[in-house]
Amino acid sequence: MGDRPSQYGRSVTTPVRIALDAMGGDAGPATMVEGAALAVRADPNLTITLFGDAAGIERERARFPILADRSSIVHAPHVISGEDKPSQAIRRAKDSSMGLSIAAVKTGEAGASVSAGNTGALMAMSKLALRTMPGIDRPALAALLPTLGDNDLVLLDLGANTECDARNLVQFAVMGAAYARTVMGLQRPRVRLLNIGTEELKGTDELRDAAQALRDATDLPIQFDGFIEGDRLGRGEADVIVTDGFSGNIALKSIEGTARFVADLLRRAFASSIRSKIGFLISRPATELLRHHLDPNNHNGAVFLGLNGIVVKSHGGASPQGVANAIGVAVKLVEADITRLVTEDLASIRSPIITGGGK
């Protein structure tokens, strides 16, 4: 297991340009532009193109002198709202901040697109503009989650594909492992399939077939450790956990809901009496560590894997530092050329599930 690198601790000097949808997110340009400023301050090789209402973006950008020479603005007259359906968003792709930021990736003007906007619209636009890469049937949404282990956890798919066959799951495993190698610096990520039990006979035919294909793929740079149950997701026993989008989305929402439940329960307990308040003061360093560990801003930046281009989804309510972290994830994926990594890994699999001889 490799060491976990810092968010921006890289030795490369290749310039990277990121296309940022400055109108996405709950707070709009104020948060997105400040996040861009934090990102370029941490990375001397980074420049950013800001897409959206030019006048509003310029007002925010004036607050951060570092962006004067490290960013540019492209005016987009329309914004994709959280209520817009994917079909509506696609019709506005040519003049919306989200659509134009994705188009910049397609034309090569930017290495990746980052948006905190409507997830469904972002996926639909990205698939239409960038298409899936060779060897991948469906893109998947992957995110980093905290664990009790030495590394974060890559969980996918988180909702892009509600139903998946064994071929899809194997492809997700390859993409998730390439993501873990890139973002967490792991040479052979530990990969497991989410299941209702750890025994080889448990689960659906699709899960068992995918597991067998991954066991047979000895040339893959992964350590396949079989199945894992939902109650072990945060224990640090895997670096990549693969599932279909239906189960993955439920697992993610359950994890997020449990984290909020624990935080609210502690807050209520500490406020229940004078003695509890004194106990809070004594235990504050530990509770602050817990809050930091569970803060989604520290793990911000879900990625659409499997496209001919890199698109990163930021939390809609992300803080400026959360936006900067999402941009940092995008930069790492650009520099590692993750599309090439996935293509090479897929080529090493000889299973008929991948080569087309069976499902």
Image (tube, helix red, strand yellow):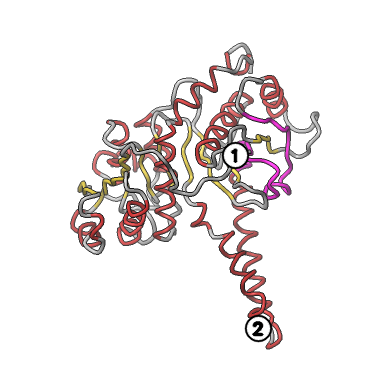
Q: x, y (%) of residue 307?
A: 43, 30
Between tags 1 and 2, which lies in front? 1
The amino acid at mark 2 is: Lys
Viewer-closest of 99 and 308: 308
State the residue lying farthest toward the left: 55
Residue pictured at 30% horizontal, 58% vertical: 29
**Residue 97 vertical placement versus 222 (above, below):** below
Q: Quadrant of the N terminus?
A: top right
State the residue lying farthest toward the front: 11
**Residue 220 vertical placement versus 26 (above, below):** above
Residue pictured at 62% horizontal, 71% vertical: 285
Horizontal side of 119 relative to 66 (left or right) equals: right
| Label 1–label 2 contact, CB within 8 A | no
Q: Which residues are magenta?
A: 222-248
State the residue lying farthest toward the top: 357
Horizontal side of 299 relative to 193 (left or right) equals: left
Q: x, y (%) of residue 313?
A: 43, 46
Secondary structure, mark 2, is helix
Q: Quadrant of the C terminus?
A: top right
Q: x, y (%) of residue 230?
A: 71, 46
**Residue 13 vertical placement versus 81 (above, below):** above
Residue 76 painted magenta: no
Distance between the Cα atoms at labels 1 and 2? Answer: 41 Å
Viewer-closest of 136 and 12: 12
Horizontal side of 4 relative to 269 (left or right) equals: left
Q: How many marks?
A: 2
The amino acid at mark 1 is: Gly
Residue 277's disc number: 2
* Residue picked out by circle 1: 2
Q: x, y (%) of residue 156?
A: 57, 39
